[in-house]
Image: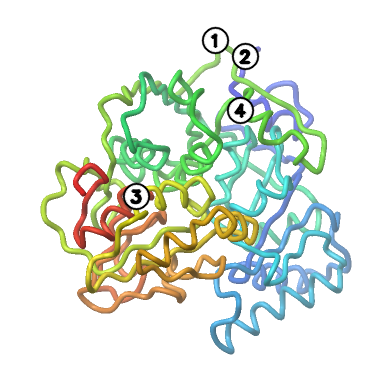
Amino acid sequence: MTMTITEKILARHADLDLVRPGMLINARVDIALGNDITAPIAIDVFRKAGAKKVFDRDRIVLVPDHFAPNKDIESAEQCKIMRDFAHEHQISHYFEVGEAGVEHALLPEKGIVGPGDLVVGADSHTCTYGALGAFATGVGSTDLAAAMLTGELWFKVPETMKFVYHGKLRPWVGGKDLILHTIGRIGVDGALYRTMEFTGEAIRELPMSDRLTMANMAIEAGGKNGIFIPDAITEAYVRGRAERPYEFYSSDSDAAYHSVIEIDVGKIEPQVSFPHLPSNARGISQVGDVRIDQSIIGSCTNGRIEDLRVAASILKGRHAARGMRLIILPATPTVYRQAMHEGLFDIFLDAGAVISLPTCGPCLGGYMGILAKGERSVATTNRNFAGRMGHPGSEVYLAGPAVAAATAVAGRLAGPDQL
């Protein structure tokens, strides 16, 4: 019987020969993830359930990344709850400030997640790991508590939407532009509780950093998960990095899909999603004259070394516009160190940027770049809902690192070719 890659992974973890969309299954969890916002709630539920021991101290990951280093007393208390729990249960993958980074950049980098895994995390962007050919999805804190206790969770098998990307990418177009265009095409609920399977010749040439970006934003279309068929690029990324044995799955050629959507990437230019929905996407040539106060380059979506290199290539020899706040947030300490050693920090500093510690920070309106009423920010983050980055009267425009860097120089929404 034929299945998609998502169905195969779920069947394997449920010890079933076959699953079909709509089935309710109980499946083993390879990794259960929590952060400084969601884990304390899960820990409270875990303790109220009378639990004395986690199912596997090597399969739970706790990352303080949203408000760490602590921005105030409340966030310090949240992080302390995580820290005490990690020490109490001898959690192998607890990352303290200095070795922590944005969770969804950190876990692939460390080899904690791998192809064929079933990963749950109490953060909606856990779907990032689908870039590696894993089934990864966000869950609530109560479900995280159950996973930490039992190592299992129930799932409803999702239908799969297949997105086939044809052609060659235009200059300055990357994974962020592809996913913004896709969400703009189907809407923020266009893949509601469905798998978004990304394939096609354009995808097969896409580097891992861009795949991670695309999988990261599957949730912005309502997707249960986003996933790529693992290939030679996947193998090159995980070889020597993966902590555990991994397995490549692929969709059968005659697998059943909810729908198949064909996209010609040669027609896609750098994208910008206008407030207040990621689906409000348009090409850079169609944005008009929109003045911007702040440019954020970072986050779990676009804070990897490849993203910083793109930004640096545009900022080199240039300076941010007068009145522009340019904030660079390397996603992990490894990315931070690499960018520093490659001389990217000099480029950013010469351009008038400030370089942040690795943190989610401004993405969720936490700190390190909060907007006042009436201010506008272009950001390589993943959400631009009203009030997402600060005052409800502020505006966030989503874009890739190329547009974010060019905008910082121009002082208005702009692509590199407009400088």
- The residue tagged with tag 2: helix, strand or loop? loop
Among the two numbered marks 2 and 4 on one chain, the one whose residue lies closer to the N terminus = 2
Residue 402 at least partly seen? yes
Query: Label 3 sits on what residue type?
Result: Ile
Which residue, given by chain and number where applicable, does mark 4 sit on?
Answer: 233
Dot placed on the residue nearer the N-terminal end, 4 or 3: 4
Q: Mark 4 or 3, which is nearer the eye?
A: 3
Q: In this view, does 303 lie above or below 296?
A: above
Please indicate whether residue 322 sits to the left or right of residue 19 in the image: left
Point out which mark residue 74 bears: none
**Residue receiving disc 1:** 254
Disc 2 marks a residue whose amino acid type is Thr
Q: Which mark is residue 314?
A: 3
State the image coordinates of residue 221 (x, y, percent, origin top left): 39, 43
Mark 3 or mark 2: which comes first in sequence? 2
Classify mark 4: residues with Cα within 10 Å, few (<14), some (14-19) or many (20+): some
Local secondary structure at mark 1:
loop
Extreme residue in the bottom direction:
73
Q: Do residues under tags 1 and 2 come within 8 Å of each other at their CB atoms? A: yes
Residue density around tag 1, few if under 14, some if 14–19, many if 20 or more, within 10 Å: few
Where is the N terminus found, in terms of image quarters? top right
Answer left or right for 88 relative to 99. right
Q: Residue 356 at what x, y percent from top left?
A: 50, 70
Query: Pointer 2 and pointer 4: residues touching (CB < 8 Å)?
Result: no
